[in-house]
Image: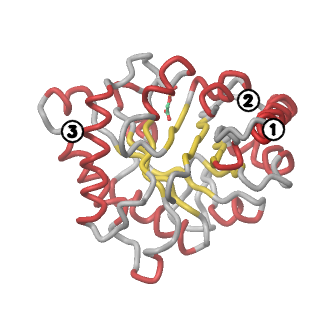
Amino acid sequence: MGNEKIFAANWKLYKNPQQTRDFFASFLPLIEKNNQNAGTHGSSSATSTKKIIFFPPAVNFEATGQALKNQTSIQWGAQNCWIQKEGAFTGETSVQTVKDLGGSWILVGHSERRKLFSETLEWTGQKVKLSLELGLSPMLCIGETLEERQAGRTDEINFQQLKAGLSQITPDLKNKTLAIAYEPVWAIGTGQVATPEQVKSAHAQIKKFLTQLGFSENTPVLYGGSVKPENAKELLAIPNVDGFLVGGASLEPQSFMKIIC
Ligand code: PGA
């Protein structure tokens, strides 16, 4: 991945198809304008050197796929999937459908899925595996709760979730693209961003764990949890921070754009 930075937007349960189209109608010209400016000024802030990923709610897959079909550095994916690609699984999202509509990522193990929808460690491993098998890239979310941090268990929890999420990847799938999003649960949607020291330490450990588990240390590790235009620059300068997973601040084109540039 080298120096490529990834900026991922987790829209959670926000926006309908029209609002999705409106978002991209504003956002894509901002990206184009930025790239033109960067080109004329020889600046390194061209978004073409960055990867942008949107995770819209499932009802917006089609609108998102349509809006992004001619984009090369902007991709999209699902916020969740089921462990099988089809069957009697009422209310679930199929990896195959995401693929058919042009999506390329699956978010796995977001803390809201783990906590509110009882996502198990076992499922995260199965979802990562199925995504890779069908040619999509998983973005595995990991991170500790406040009680776990206060009990000094941050690294232990990160290792446990990382290990379970990656445990079912077979050797033939090991060199496929995947990403990790470190999101301390207490920093999500709270406005309470982790300190640079906390982020630095967690990311360094996660990179170490990745190599222990047989994965490349170049596997991107994104930070998530109250990332805003005001704190993005400082966070992105921290070693081993390869980008962001952004919730609230990605819902508005200008705000997300400020985080990217
Ligand atoms: P937040 O959400 O940026 O609103 O804290 C991040 C996430 O849940 O991925």
Please give the residue where the numbered disc 3 appears in the rendered image: 154
Image coordinates for residue 3, horizontal then vertical, percent: 51, 52
Tag on residue 21? none
- Work out whether mark 2 precedes mark 3 in sequence or the reverse, and give the earlier one: 2
Front-most of residues 222 and 260? 260
Given the image, on which type of amino acid does mark 1 rest?
Answer: Thr
Front-most of residues 47 and 214? 47
Q: Residues within 10 Å of mark 3 (few under 14, many from 20)?
A: many
Q: Taking 114 as reference, is 255 left or right?
A: right
Disc 3 beta carbon < 8 A from ligand 1? Answer: no
Q: Residues within 10 Å of mark 1 (few under 14, many from 20)?
A: few
Query: Vertical placement of 82 versus 188: above or below?
Result: below
Front-most of residues 60 and 143? 143
The residue at the point 60 percent across, 65 percent down is: 136
Please give the residue where the numbered disc 2 appears in the rendered image: 15
Q: Residues within 10 Å of mark 2 (few under 14, many from 20)?
A: some
- Work out whether mark 2 precedes mark 1 in sequence or the reverse, and give the earlier one: 2
The residue at the point 58 percent across, 58 percent down is: 89
- Work out whether mark 3 precedes mark 1 in sequence or the reverse, and give the earlier one: 1
Q: Taking 139 as reference, is 47 left or right?
A: right
The quadrant of the rendering that contains the C terminus is: top right
Question: At numbered mark 2, what does the secondary structure look like: helix, strand or loop?
Answer: loop
Query: Vertical placement of 182 versus 192: above or below?
Result: below
- Are the residues at dot 2 and dot 3 in contact (C-beta closer than 8 Å)? no
Given the image, on which type of amino acid does mark 2 rest?
Answer: Lys
Q: How many marks?
A: 3
Please give the residue where the numbered disc 1 appears in the rendered image: 40
Q: What is the CA distance from the residue labelled 2 to the residue labelled 1? A: 35 Å
Q: Taking 155 as reference, is 131 left or right?
A: right
Q: What is the CA distance from the residue labelled 2 to the residue labelled 3? A: 33 Å
Image coordinates for residue 140, horizontal then vertical, percent: 44, 52
Question: At numbered mark 3, what does the secondary structure look like: helix, strand or loop?
Answer: helix
